[in-house]
Amino acid sequence: MSVKLIISRVTFVGYLFIHVFWHYLRKFWILSLVILFIFFGWQIKKMYFPAFDRSQLNFENARSVHIPAGTNLREIADILVSEKILKNKSTFLLLAKITGYQNKIHAGYFSIPLHLPPWHLLKYLTQPENALLKVTIPEGLTCQEIAGILKSKLGIDSTRFMRLVNDSSICQQYGISASNLEGYLLPETYFFTYQMPEKDILKIMISGTLSIFENDSVQYQMSHLQMNRHQIITLASIIEGEVVVDSERVLVSSVYHNRLRRGWLLGADPTIQYIIPGPPRRLLRKDLEIDSPYNTYKYRGLPPGPINNPGKRSILAAIFPAQTSYMFFVATGNGGHHFSSTAAEHAHWKANFDEIRKQVKRNQRNNR
């Protein structure tokens, strides 16, 4: 075989080898790039998109955060940063934009766990847990005043709330013998969610009042007094309007029960305040002549319904009055009252209170 032929064949084999090697080498690089792409993609996913398990969330140190309606993504991120819930704002914003989750974040008050990675936080905010907001309703407020508090604290529709309060069908639903719910919304400290449906709030507050009457001893005592639930709540609302010192509730109750038993006028100042427009003020003689079924200086017995929403202590005081012979009481000037069984004794304490009032006026003039 000639040297030329050998060289020719070696050249051909070498060419063939290089061609085949390059063919597979090229595929190998493509495969390598695919593998690298998958690997780095998985690392990125692991780093920025870790698996999210809601059942593992820890709410022990969660924060209650308000996200107002109409807040944009950057403003939401600023709120989360200020509440020390979010550290990496730029990552949060980027993930929200590339995933489209920026349009899935809700407005409201939410309970948000601390130390969530940006991706977990973003996922959580698309289906957050509503935060429980503490709302305290003081004793003796009207339903209108309660509606104002709930609007301020929970963002409810106070007009819709009052429409439900005055819906007689709601009263019938709860077995309330009245045309509205005045008196039946129990003052208490509640934990509601933001913009909770008004009907659900009413259900909770009404149930609190009605539950007081479920006790057997309460039922027995009401039978003994020959008074129904509506009468008790009406009397309780008057007691609530009179009392500042808690221990005096049962004493004021005893006075009104004694007057009712004897057929006297109740002569309760809070019922006059109820029919006078505006905030409470000192009553004038002409106020006592207002022609209204709520004027207990003019009409005997209880007024048609409650004048406010009494607390549990006043309701129980109306059901379980102290056993006294008291027929009168007058203010002491320091929040309490002097109680009397006779008109003469009452006149003495009233003159004493009038003197205190005059002294207060003199002091006010001297301090001007």
Image (cartoon, rainbow, N blue to C red):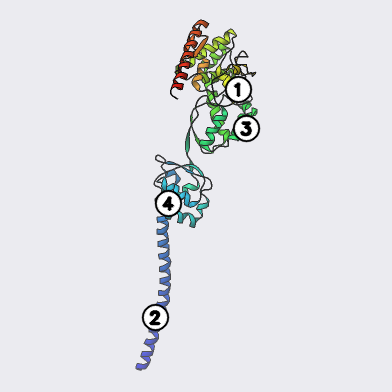
Res 324 seen here: no
Label 1 sits on what residue type? Answer: Ile
Residue 27 lies, with reference to residue 53, above or below; the image says below
Q: Secondary structure at mark 1?
A: helix
Q: The N terminus is located in which quarter? A: bottom left
Gap in Å between the C-alphas at discs 3 and 4?
43 Å
Q: Quadrant of residue 367?
A: top left
Gap in Å between the C-alphas at discs 3 and 2?
89 Å
* Residue topped by disc 2: 18
Disc nearest the viewer among 1 and 2: 1
- Which mark is first along the chain, 4 or 3? 4
Label 4 sits on what residue type? Answer: Pro
Q: Quadrant of residue 196?
A: top right
* Residue topped by disc 4: 118
- Which mark is first along the chain, 2 or 3? 2
Res 145 seen here: yes
Q: Which label belongs to residue 275? A: 1
- Which mark is first along the chain, 4 or 1? 4
Disc nearest the viewer among 2 and 4: 4
Q: Residue at x 53, y 16 (%)?
A: 318
Q: Residues within 10 Å of mark 3 (few under 14, many from 20)?
A: few
Q: Residues within 10 Å of mark 1 (few under 14, many from 20)?
A: some
Label 2 sits on what residue type? Answer: Ile
- Which mark is first along the chain, 3 or 1? 3
Gap in Å between the C-alphas at discs 1 and 2?
106 Å
- Counting from the top left corner in percent of width and height, residue 350 is at 50, 11
- Counting from the top left corner in percent of width and height, residue 279 is at 55, 26
Residues marked 2 and 4 touching at CB (< 8 Å): no
* Residue topped by disc 3: 163
Disc nearest the viewer among 3 and 2: 3
